[in-house]
Amino acid sequence: MSTSGDEQRSLGPAQSVSNEFAFITFTRVLTGNGERLLLESPKRRRRVLLDPVVLDALTCFTPEELSRLVASLDEERSGDGRPIPTEKEA
């Protein structure tokens, strides 16, 4: 089945992971460009579709490097407390 435009078809139920700092849901979806992982952060009101190439690239980082990246983003965004607009909102 092909999808067009922004159409997405879920390939399974949404699942979640959380701790005292974050709550994230994730779902495998089929888009017009193939399979993606849809990550959603209700707290930040953000969502992103990640393709296999991006997910594979994440495995190249050490946990320390990823922690530094997250810390730098939190510092950068802490100015006004508003979520960064999604691609469609921008």
Image: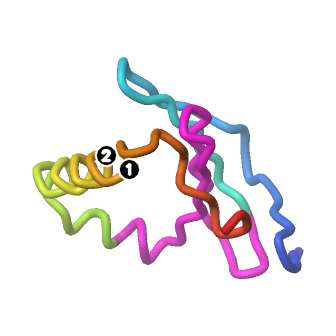
- Mark 2 is on which residue type? Asp
Can you tell which quarter of the image residue 79 is in?
Answer: top left
Range shown magenta: 30-56
Left or right position of 39 against 88: left
- Mark 1 is on which residue type? Arg
Residue 74 location, x and y as percent?
A: 31, 46
Can you tell which quarter of the image residue 48 is in?
Answer: bottom right
- How many circles with numbers are drawn on the protein? 2
Residue 56 location, x and y as percent?
A: 36, 70
- Whether residue 49 is in magenta: the answer is yes
Toward the front, the furthest residue is 80
Residue 35 location, x and y as percent?
A: 65, 69
Left or right position of 80 against 68: right
Q: Are marks 1 and 2 in contact (CB under 8 Å)?
A: yes
Q: Can residue 2 be seen from the camera position used here? A: no
Relative to residue 20, is residue 54 depicted above or below? Answer: below
- Residue bearing mark 2: 74
Can you tell which quarter of the image residue 65 is in?
Answer: bottom left
At a point 21% along the width and 68% down the height, the residue shown is: 60
At a point 73% along the width and 45% down the height, the residue shown is: 12
Quadrant placement of the C terminus: bottom right
Relative to residue 49, is residue 75 depicted above or below? Answer: above
Seen from the viewer's position, the closer of residues 21 and 86 is 86
Alpha carbon separation for disc pair 1 and 2: 5 Å
- Residue bearing mark 1: 77
- Whether residue 45 is in magenta: the answer is yes
Left or right position of 64 against 55: left
SS for dot 1: helix
At a point 32% along the width and 72% down the height, the residue shown is: 57
At a point 74% along the width and 53% down the height, the residue shown is: 11
